[in-house]
Image: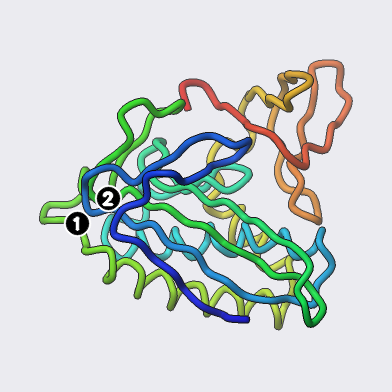
Amino acid sequence: MGPLWLTAERQTAGRGRRGRAWETGQGRNLATTLLLVTSRPPAEAAQISFVAALAVADMAAAFVPASLISLKWPNDPMISGRKASGILIESGPAPAGGLWLAVGIGVNLAEAPVAAERPATTLAAHMAGPPPMPMAALQALSEAFVLWMDVWERVGFEAIAGAWTQRAHGFGQACQARLGSETLSGIAEGLDTDGALRLRLSDGSLRRITAGDVFFGES
């Protein structure tokens, strides 16, 4: 299966992390999913979320100043410190072996959600002219995805983590990690070798955060 990109003119029943409702709104936003199969084990296959975030960042940089773009752990592309895109990875056993992966990506091209949990923005808000049409954005995204997938496959996750860290939002700053059953506060030190967030707590101990929501100040 795949790789295959699917897209919709509007998505009204999308799902974000932890089952949150999500939709593209009335504007010309991008809602797309990449389907593919991998032979990587599940923990390693999950690293594709960092590949996706880098591809979204490159796509956005084709239309807005690259200096405005950052990436917030685990996979939130930001523009001027506000969320501009969402990424959700789903997976399962493939009939012929390995795992199927569905890489869902939404990008606020022209309209931001009104009742977002975190401050959101659009590409249009940072452009002098009109935002790209969804298919133009998808073309740029798919081309960037191919390049970063090639890096991941040839060089490994270390190269992906390094490129992601160069665009990281909030590393070295105080943050709050909400993990469902507990909330932790500390300093976000950076990525671990597998992509987990290294969080230094006030007592000096280090926690590896593998899943959860991280908040930096007003973000």
Q: Residue furthest left?
A: 129
Q: Are marks 1 and 2 in contact (CB under 8 Å)?
A: yes
Which residue position holds label 1?
131
Q: Nearer the viewer, residue 74 or 188?
A: 74
Q: Is residue 29 or residue 85 the one in the foreground? A: 29
Label 1 vs 2, first from the N-terminus: 2
x 34%, y 46%: residue: 24
Mark drawn on residue 123: 2
Q: Quadrant of residue 135?
A: bottom left
Q: Does 201 sit left or right of 134 as displayed?
A: right
Q: Position of residue 214 (x, y in %)?
A: 62, 31
Question: Residue 164: horizontal and vertical position, in percent?
Answer: 59, 57
User: Looking at the picture, does residue 117 appear above or below residue 19?
Assistant: above
Q: Amino acid at mark 2?
A: Leu
Which one is in front, 86 or 126? 86
Q: Is residue 215 left or right of residue 10?
A: right
Q: What residue is drawn where x is 63% and y is 77%? A: 151
Position above or below: 186 against 26: above
Quarter-wise, where is residue 162 in the image? bottom right
Mark 1 neighbour class, 10 Å CA radius: few under 14, some 14 to 19, many 20 or more: many
Query: Which residue is more in the foreground, 177 or 169?
Result: 177
Residue type, mark 1 in image:
Pro
How far apart in space, not on screen, are marks 1 and 2 (Cα)?
6 Å
Residue 115 in the image: state x and y as whole percent. Answer: 36, 25
Q: Residues within 10 Å of mark 2 (few under 14, many from 20)?
A: many
Task: Identify the element where label 1 is drawn.
Answer: loop
Q: Residue sitting at 74 percent across and 52 percent down?
A: 195
State the residue at coordinates (18%, 51%). Answer: 127
